[in-house]
Amino acid sequence: MTQVYKHEVKYYECDRMGVTHHSNYIRFMEESRIDWMDQLGYGYERMEAEGIVSPVVAISCNYKRTTTFKDVIEIEVKVAEMTELKLSFSYTMRVGGAVVCTATSTHCFLEAGRPVRLSERFPELYAAIVGVM
């Protein structure tokens, strides 16, 4: 499942040069990933209610072009890789069709602070993710 999430750059997300500060792209990734999980039918609220947390274990961003206040960034989110213990997403961010950033994030799954095999402990979520790859 590839999904596009839209984020309009806020004034406070820009630096003194009027350019979106690089750290905000990580937040945009999180916003779009949470929306992706909601669309999957297994949002973060549900995961946490069932005892799962999914922290970031790796992240990378490649900035291609700057964005500025009021730009609408279209963020394409999709599963890049899935294992029993980790899930990686890829993100392609565009403004007006031009790629402004490409990125990836990798997450593990924990219950009570310990890694879990998603397919064993939460087979419904595992099947839902595998089903959209």
Image: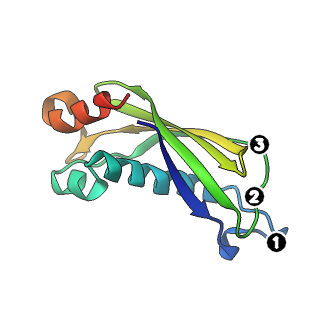
Where residue 48 sits, quadrant-wise, is bottom left
Residue corresponding to mark 2? 67
Residue 65: % across, % down: 79, 48
Q: Earlier in the sequence, mark 3 or mark 1?
A: 1
Residue 128: % across, % down: 25, 35
Q: From mark 2 to mark 1, how far is it between C-alphas?
A: 13 Å
Tag on residue 16?
1
Amino acid carrying mark 3 in the image: Lys
Mark in front: 2 vs 1 = 2
Q: Residue at x 30, y 28 (%)?
A: 130
4, 104: nearer the viewer:
4
Q: Residues within 10 Å of mark 2 (few under 14, many from 20)?
A: many
Q: Residue at x 28, y 49 (%)?
A: 53
Question: Are the two marked residues, 2 and 1, in contact with CB atoms closer than 8 angstroms?
Answer: no
Q: Is residue 57 left or right of residue 49?
A: right
Mark in front: 3 vs 1 = 3
Q: How many marks?
A: 3
Question: Are the two marked residues, 3 and 1, in contact with CB atoms closer than 8 angstroms?
Answer: no
Q: For the residue labelled by badge 3, is the local secondary structure a helix, a strand or a loop?
A: loop
Tag on residue 64?
3
Q: For the residue labelled by badge 2, is the local secondary structure a helix, a strand or a loop?
A: loop
Where residue 73 sits, quadrant-wise, is bottom right
Q: Quadrant of the C terminus?
A: top left
Q: Is residue 117 visible?
A: no
Position of residue 77 relative to residue 69, above or below, is: above
Question: Are the two marked residues, 3 and 2, in contact with CB atoms closer than 8 angstroms?
Answer: no
